[in-house]
Amino acid sequence: MLMQKKQSIMDFSTIDRSLLSLTRRHPPLPPDVLQLSQSLLDLLSSSSSNNNNVDSPPSVVTTQPEYISGIQRLLSLGSERWEPLAVGLCLAAHCIEYHVSSLLRHTDDEKHGGGVYAEGPRIPQVNPSSSTPPATHATTTPPRSMDGLSSESPIFDLLHSLPPTIHANIEHPEPRVRSLVARTVGAYASITTGLAVHILHGEGRGWGDDVKTRIGQLQPKRREVHDAILKSLKVHFEWKRPGVEVEWNERERGDATTIDDDNQIAGDGTAEPPRISKASDGALDDTTGWRALETNLHALAAYIDGCCVTPVVVVDDDNDEDHTRETYTGSYLSEQLHLLTTTTTTTTDNWFLAGLHYCSVTHVNRHVRAASSAVLGVIVTSCKQCRAYDLLLDSPFRNVVKESLYANLADNWSQVRMSGSVLCRTFVEALLMIYRRREEEKNHGIPKEEEEDLTEFELAVGDMVPMLLPRMCLNRFYLAQGVKLYSQDTWKIVFGGKQEPPQQEGHGGEGEEEGGLHSSETTRGGGGMGAVARNAAPLCRYYSKMCDADNHAVREAACQGVAELAQKLGKHPLYAEYLSPYVTMLLQALLMCFHDESWPVRDEACLACGTFCLAYAEECAPELPTLYERWTEQLTDQIWSVREDAAVALGDAITAYGPEMMEKVLALIRKKLPAARDQPAMSREEYKRLQNDASAHTGTQLYSCGSLAPKLRKGGAGRIGCSSCALDRPKAPWEASDGCVYLIRELCIRFADKDNTAREDVVIGDAVLLPIMTELSDVCRLSHYPQSDDLRTTLWRQLPPIARALGKRRFKGMYLDLFIELLSKNIDDRFNCASQLSIHAAGQCAEELANLIGHGIFRGRMAEVGGADAFDRVMAERKREHMTLQAAGGFVGATQFSPFGPPMAGVVR
């Protein structure tokens, strides 16, 4: 059943696959549909076989009357089943796009649409294949199929037949059909405006008057498509405005536009509109799509992007060649500029900007908000191409974009935040281009003296900097990989910087973007770091507010952003003073996050506080008792990474506050390290029975990060998390010992060597360290509880950095014998009583220690405790692992990578 369902899925990735999908549908499609699908497949196959270049698309099949008539036939067969209609739209859009690639082969990309952002798979896109022509911007040399265009060309028949199909199906019940209708609208606008512009430029070899007549007949049809979209949008904009029912009743009956029961514009009735759009299937939530509104927005975005933008020189003042201007015939703005320039309530066009504002800022549905951002983005691109700079600099449209960015860049849904990020980059790039062109015209590229201390971003964006910059900063740390990576690239584009991924500070630390808050003497205005420093006030206020946001992913990103401020600005000689007045406010926000229900938030807040203590020790001193209490709580947390990062933060505190803090941390280690001795005894079998007890896991509430259940109540400090504190298990004693292992590592790395210590007045000598290490080895020998393997795994992972910090001679002489016997037994595991994690960690530890001390010496020490054979076996296994990595194109010691991030170079997957 599962295989049958998988085989029957519609595949729109290529035109041949979409046709093949028709033959696999269950229940089967009518015979005439299957026969037509097979005939079109035969045409594609014969075209590919007759083509000399197998890598180039079939340029003949898209102009054959049989192929285009087959597309029209598919479109007409979609009345009973949606599949033929969808495939027909896919083929029609692809055919038109292929002709557009020929029509615009000499057109610069900047003069054509920049593409419409559509989140996820909601707008299917046909990818090139051996039998598939390319999209609009082809990488291969486009054909010259439009040069010999005649009035009898079958492409005209297709173009004349498409508008009724678009009108009838733009609110189709099937979302895939609606998405393909939107794509077809874009292709239709692209070819019709492209043909008109070709005539204006005097191009089109061999085009007679009859061809120009047929092209002229297409323009009203294109406008009809656009008018139908706007009419539907206007109706939905009116329905979705708050209080529209009251306003509707208050209107004069003769002026009201009404909707009948079938969701058609009646015009002659005066009944009240329904409270729920029938075309949206009553969807009033934030998850499902709003059928007509969402698709109309996508179609409008595709239409605007498809309109060809090519300047045409016009001579004014009685053919005086000294007085010329450029017009952009065919562009969206040349025909619909009035929609973007009216704001008064007495104007009938006021609804457009007001509707876009409502849908992009306050609409309840996330898909609608994302689609509205896409519309704003293509309008910004059109303004940039047509040089309609006033719309982007000072107009009601700029205000709509500003408020949309304000809302969408901080939206709770990642897909809306992503669409806002795309709009942000498009808008900022347009403003930067305008600023650079105007400065080049006025000052020949030389900045004014009063502007040398500001970045181009600050000068171009102007009054929007306090709103835009904090959101751009925070989204570089957002949990969703798409938003994070895209925002990081946007930052690099705007401010420059190395094209490198974020690096991890410390051991669990915050992301530090090399291409982000950089500062250079050659960078105007100090680059990103200078812009952040000058706008520290709004940035810090925004970060503080986001630390108390309802979304745990936002709180986590805010904590990382705060840590970055302390790391970058706090240690900078020029910009540290800019952040100093806001340290207390940021520190209070981080302290609140220590109580968060979401452990990643607590983790990031813990690290950020340690970083602040390093950068602003004096300002943080009043809160040090509270911070120390929070760090010690985190050191015994149930999550191992939280324990590790608490140790890192305590190490930062010692570096910041010196011997007094060192004594408190040593007392903490002496108290908490033996805690594993108090762990209740339990056999491994009892532990497994407890974990596998069905009654303990039956009939309980299911929780996850994506669940709506935890969002029904607030906990902790009044915020929503991804888990409930009421469901947390108690802390186990052995976890305190585990946290002390990380803390011992931090002490050794930072303060064990007097010649390389973080503070000259803090050095941990053997008289202090040896008793602690002895206690550590004794605690790790305990085996009366099943989690003892987890504690030993932590020890084996931290012992190599401890050994390197102490130095070869010191570690070999005083500390190796404390752990060599335990290490040998863990590697050997003759009685199969150790976990595979601890065995692997022990083997890796043995290899690293052998590399430090010397293989011969280390093997001799292992032989003294009877572990020589086990050591030899481990070394042989490690050697095979390294050879396998090298054979696969990887490298020894490769860092782990996220499956959701960009592919790593040199790693074969």
Image (cartoon, rainbow, N blue to C red):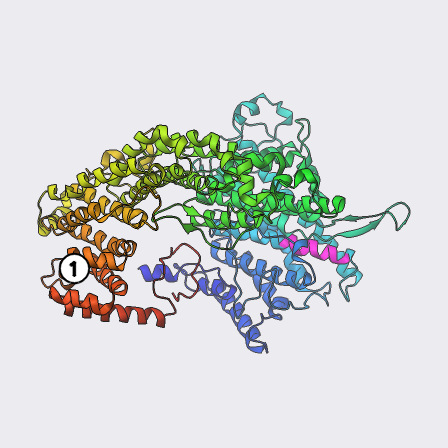
Say if residue 723 shows up in the picture.
Answer: yes
Residue 687 % position (x, y): 12, 48
Number of numbered tags placed on the structure image: 1
> Residue placed farthest to the top in the image?
250
Q: Is residue 561 shown in magenta?
A: no
Residue 715 % position (x, y): 30, 30
For the point 56% across and 25% down, the residue is 248
For the point 53% across and 65% down, the residue is 128
Q: Is residue 189 shown in magenta?
A: yes
| Residue 811 occupies quadrant | bottom left
Left/right placement of residue 621 relative to residue 486 reads: left
The prevailing secondary structure element of the residues shown in magenta is helix
Q: Is residue 57 placed above or below 497 in the rendered structure?
A: below
Which of 631 and 719 lies nearest the eye of the viewer? Answer: 631
Quadrant of the drawing holding the C terminus: bottom left
Residue 320 % position (x, y): 90, 49
Residue 459 % position (x, y): 64, 39
Quadrant of the drawing holding the N terminus: bottom left
Say if residue 416 shows up in the picture.
Answer: no
Left/right placement of residue 108 relative to residue 545 reads: right
User: Which residue is disc 1 drawn over?
Assistant: 820
Q: Is residue 404 placed above or below 486 in the rendered structure?
A: above
Q: Is residue 89 placed above or below 616 in the rendered structure?
A: below
Specify start and end residues of the magenta stretch as a single range: 188-199
**The residue under label 1 is which amino acid type?**
Ile
